[in-house]
Image: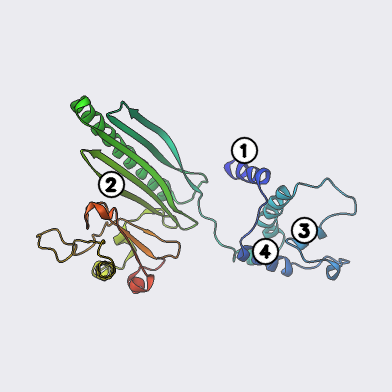
Amino acid sequence: MNPIDKQIRSLARKERLTLPPETEECIRRTLRRLPSTPGSSDEAEEPGPFPAARKLSSSRRKPRLPRPAAAAAAVLALFFLLPNISASAAETMSELPVIGAIVEVITIRNYFYDDGYHRSSVDVPQVELETESENSSLGDSVDAINADVQAMTDRLIAEFEADRAALGDSGHTELSVSYQVVTNNDAWFTLQILVYYGSGSGTQTYYYYHIDKQSGQIVQLSDLFLEGSDYQTVISDEILRQMKEQMAKDDNITYWIDTEYEGMDFHSITPDQNFFFSEDGNLVIQFDEYEIAPGSMGSPQFEISRSVYQDLLKEGY
């Protein structure tokens, strides 16, 4: 049984399936365009989620599927049968949102240690493609991310073990690695990995991995913008504006701008600056702890309205 079949069966057993409004409307429009069967009584039918599905039933009652299973079967019928029996249905089905390759992240290894002096909790993620993709670049990108994550976590664990052995019971060390999927839709995938490492004092570091599912490529911040555009200045100026505004409103907020210490002040983001997209589609710039502010500020984030940089984006972003 392929992964799609497994997923549909699982959903049918566990929950009632629902469709996004735009998808349901496209399906309704498809059904309305289908030619009527001679002798059918369309006018007598009550509207429902899948009105045409009832017209296909014979007078002889057949065993009824549970509602979730029936919904799943109806969706499968609409997607796989209608385009083959009706040219108008096939044309209308092309208006439905494209379903991208299904990507999931699993934990392939855990590393735990605690002797009272030294502690570690490491979850090592692995990105997997749950559906085959014609775009070979997508598989290559997934492999590259997994290789990088594996190398990074191996290095961190080796450093932890070396520090633990060197310090013994005369010091303390702590390593924590966790992850979350920030975005995983038809067009975009973002994996966030958070690393905390402490020995005396501690630091928190973020790693972000992005895949453009349409191109299959791994993407960094600079890839979003037109060649030669001054996106770094535009976004950095907006971050500086927000910093100053926050500091003016709250004396407890401090960023390293206009300080007396040379080389400490924030001036500009980098081409590979950590970022992700908010639910509203705005760019969120992520800084690590101590990167632009004292440790009391944690790991600052700045959401940049799309209107600020819209004209600098490449087509498709």
Residue at the spot 37% in from the left edge and 42% down from the top edge: 178
- Where the N terminus falls, by quadrant? top right
The picture places residue 33, in percent across and down from the top left corner, at 72, 69
Q: Earlier in the sequence, mark 4 or mark 2?
A: 4
Q: How much space separates mark 3 and mark 4, taking CA atoms? A: 11 Å
- Residue 303 image-quadrant placement: bottom left
Q: How much space separates mark 3 and mark 2, taking CA atoms? A: 55 Å
Q: How much space separates mark 4 and mark 2, taking CA atoms? A: 48 Å
Identify which amino acid the numbered label 2 is placed on: Gln
**Marks 1 and 2: which is nearer the front?**
2
Q: Secondary structure at mark 4?
A: helix
Q: Secondary structure at mark 3?
A: helix
Q: How is the image coloured?
A: rainbow
Q: Which residue is mark 2?
A: 204
Determine which of the numbered discs, if any, sits on residue 77 in the image.
Answer: none
> On the picture, is 272 further left or further right than 315?
left
Q: How much space separates mark 1 and mark 2, taking CA atoms? A: 43 Å
Q: Which residue is mark 1?
A: 1
CB contact under 8 Å: marks 1 and 2: no
Determine which of the numbered discs, if any, sits on residue 53 in the image.
Answer: 3
Q: Earlier in the sequence, mark 1 or mark 2?
A: 1
The picture places residue 158, in percent across and down from the top left corner, at 25, 31
